[in-house]
Amino acid sequence: MDIYGQALLDFYNNQPEEKLWLNNNYGEPEEMPVAVFFRDEAEMPEAEMLALNLCRGKVLDIGAGAGSHALILQERNFEVTAVEISVGAAAIMQKRGVKTVVQQDVFQYKTEKFDTLLLLMNGIGLTQNLTGLNRFLQHAKTLLLPGGQLIFDSSDIAYLYEDLPQPENNYYGEISYQYQYK
């Protein structure tokens, strides 16, 4: 079931808004406002704007969600391909006007090469752990043109362990989460 995609579709179609929850392995469930996935340029945080300003050439927006970053880059005349595993999210991007949408797991994507690989809103989390990060970086090399760049953001969660011991069996930045909706 595409829980994330369903939440995006409901929001886009003005359905009565249910809450999207993010269950995690480090604390209480957190409410995730669905509107955050539909932000325009004026609503983007500074770090995301910096990342968008650093993009160059052909861009692959990985884990593109509802397409907000891809749309901004398109407005700036970038050639953007948005890849997203969620069927619902891919449908929303097409409805919102993202020109090139690929509904596929990025690890299966091998179609073309890019100047910039972009993963925002903690999109690098798709790697799941340090082993997965290495696997992703190896795959990213196959998607980049010579001189290409990888741009991503990540949250520092060290504050979660100020009063708690860090995990013993894995890197403390390896978190797991699952969406809950309806």
Image: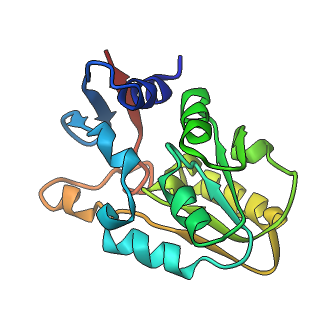
Q: Residue 44 appears in which quarter of the rendering?
A: bottom left
Residue drawn at x 12%, y 57% as measured from the top left = 163
Q: Quadrant of the C terminus?
A: top left
**Which residue sits at x=66%, y=79%?**
56
Q: How many marks?
A: 0
Query: Measured along the vertical axis of the image, is residue 149 above or below residue 104?
Result: below
Picture coordinates of residue 115 (x, y %)? 75, 74
Residue 161's place in the image compared with 19, above or below, is below
Q: Quadrant of residue 55?
A: bottom right
**Residue 131 in the image: x percent, y percent?**
62, 53
Please name the colour scheme applied to the rendered image.
rainbow
Reply above or below: 153 against 111.
below
Residue projecting furthest to the left: 163
Q: Is residue 128 visible?
A: no
User: Which residue is found at the position 27% from the left and 39% from the top?
Assistant: 32
Q: Is residue 101 left or right of residue 13?
A: right
**Is residue 132 something one can see in this rendering?**
yes
The furthest residue to the right = 111
Residue 96 picture quarter: top right
Residue 72 at x, y = what percent? 51, 63
Question: Which residue occupies 63% across, 51% down?
Answer: 132
From the viewer's perspective, is 90 left or right of 158?
A: right
Q: Residue furthest bottom?
A: 147
Residue 61 horizontal side relative to residue 153, left or right: right
Residue 139 in the image, given as x and y percentages of width and height: 77, 58
